Image (cartoon, grey):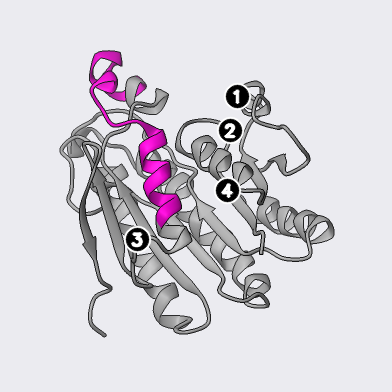
Amino acid sequence: MKKTVVITGASRGLGLELAKKFITAGDTVFGISRTRKYWAAARLFEPSRKFRLMQCDVASENAVVSLVRKIKRTAPRVDILINNAGYCGRLMRVEETSVRDLTKHYRQNLVSAFLMCKYFIPIMKTVARPLIVNISSMAGTRAVPRLFPYSAVKFGVLALSQAIAKENDGNLKCVTVCPGGMNTKMRADLFGREDSDRQQEAGFVAEVTNRVIRGEIEVLSGGHIVIRHGKITGIYPPPAA
């Protein structure tokens, strides 16, 4: 059966690569983007009505509630939710980090994923084998110097997935994907183009993630997979209760 998929941060990078995978398979994709800035690139991959881009600030509760209502009017079901939207900020030491910096990371990376899960879980429970994939980072499995805010909230994304898995045991699966560096604009903005060019391609991470979603690579609910340097470097079970 074809799936209905919601992907945040879908207008570029990993989100766009994931959207392409589902569209190719004939699934219906609702791609969510905070702004229209990169929508022109995403529209290149709209061969049919299977891909619909929607604007939403997923860090805003009111906006997410409105988004859920709009999608429910259009689609009878949501099978898969992928929380991919993220923010990396800039390199800074802990003592240079302001509360404002930390709060922005918290809202853009953790609150956003929480709100999407909070409001989509109730409607996803009505379908068979619902799945949530939260995109964290290797920085969410071990802290990175000068990226404390990003690391901290990405650790939080891992905790969110584990809690959802335990609360919905047998009714809804939730896994976390933790990529290492990717050759994306976000990486280039943070570390420079030369560094970005040395990183793994977003398309490879999307392919591995797609295989997890299709069940070709087993990641238990509450578990996570780490993808680094173009390889799967670890698949980890959920922590013991």
Residue ID for mark 4: 7
Residue at (61, 38) in percent of width and height: 33
Q: Nearer the viewer, mark 3 or mark 4?
A: 3
Task: Report how far apart the C-alphas of labels 3 and 4 lie in the structure.
Answer: 20 Å
Q: Where residue 9 appears, x then y in whole percent?
A: 54, 40
Name the residue rendered at 60%, 48% in the picture. Answer: 25
Of labels 3 and 1, earlier in sequence is 1
Quarter occupied by the N terminus:
bottom right
**Coordinates of residue 145 in the picture (x, y in percent):** 15, 38
Mark 3–mark 1 Cα distance, whole angstroms, equals 31 Å
Can you identify the residue that label 1 sits on? Answer: 38
At 41% from the left and 51% from the top, the residue drawn is: 209
Dividing the picture into quadrants, the one containing residue 56 is top right
Determine crowd level at label 4: few under 14, some 14-19, many 20+ residues with C-alpha closer than 10 A.
many
Q: Label 3 belongs to which residue? A: 217
Give the residues drawn in magenta, as a range: 189-211
